[in-house]
Amino acid sequence: MSVTATSAARDAAIDPRSHQTFIQLLEQLYRERALVPYAAGRPMPLRADEILIICRGIVQLFTIQQDGSETLLGLAGPSMPVGLPLTTVDPYWATALTDVDVLSLPMAEIEGSSVLMAGMFRNITLRMQQVEAWLALSGKRLVADRLKHFLLMLAQDFGHVEPGGIRIPMRLTHHQLATAIGTTRVTVTRLLKDFKTEGWLTIDQRHILLQLDPRFPANQLVNPMAQR
């Protein structure tokens, strides 16, 4: 049976209007397939005819400038697709920021499945919203504002609510934070110390914990990706 025919048969058994998450849907469709694990820090091979769906963990996406400096293009978490078919940036690569599990899907299989296409559309939209939020962030004149809003975006997209605030469950170096907001590592180090002195954040087990209301009210958010 062809890939398209197989996908169509699976689509018939799944209601694309259901309230299942994209990951649950993929698990139902592809129980027979093994997820590919990558340990934190490992590069993830990308192919021109393949999409990787992040099922667990967080992936960082990079390019490199002519002067050799890296640019952090974005972070992809659970349910989000990454891959060369989704970008025109060159060079472009992905690295596991945390331990991750991914599901590999050929583009031909995605294009032959209305269910997969619908799930992909929703999650590609979230990535577009993230990209635009990052672009808007770059327009803030004060570096302190850029860093604070970037941390709020990370908390909103990936944070875990705890009694003491919002934990950002990833270990970004000061260099990585500096790359993301267009400043220097020294400046990020100084600003993080200032934020700790102000009581706005603490460092716990090498994770940043933002001292926000655990209910995370909308007026503390800066990114439309909250509505997932």
Image: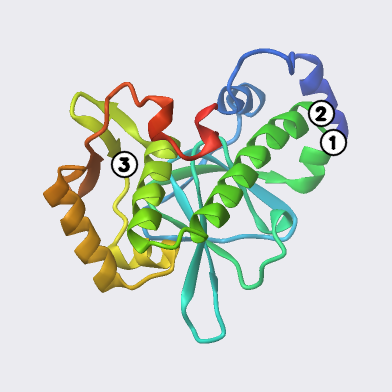
As measured in the structure, the alpha-carbon distance from the residue carrying label 1 to the one carrying label 2 is: 7 Å
Q: At which x and y percent is residue 194? A: 18, 56
Q: In this view of the protein, which residue sits in the foreground, 130 or 75?
A: 130
Count neighbours of disc 1 (C-alpha within 10 A) and say few if under 14, some if 14 to 19, many if 20 or more. some
**Whether label 3 touches label 1, CB < 8 Å:** no
- The residue indicated by pointer 1 is 112
Q: Is residue 62 left or right of residue 85?
A: left
Label 3 vs label 1: CA separation?
Answer: 37 Å
Residue under the point 67% across and 41% down: 124
| Residue 114, numbered label | 2
Q: Which residue is mark 3?
A: 168
Q: Which mark is residue 70?
A: none
Viewer-nearest residue: 208 or 147:
147
Quadrant of the frame with the C terminus = top right
Residue depicted at 58% across the width and 26% down the height = 27
Identified by mark 1, the residue type is: Gly
* Quadrant in which the N terminus appears: top right
Q: Position of residue 73 (x, y in %)?
A: 54, 60
One can see residue 64 in this view: yes
Farthest residue in the left direction? 197
- Residue type, mark 2 in image: Ser
The image position of residue 152, as x and y in percent, is 38, 42
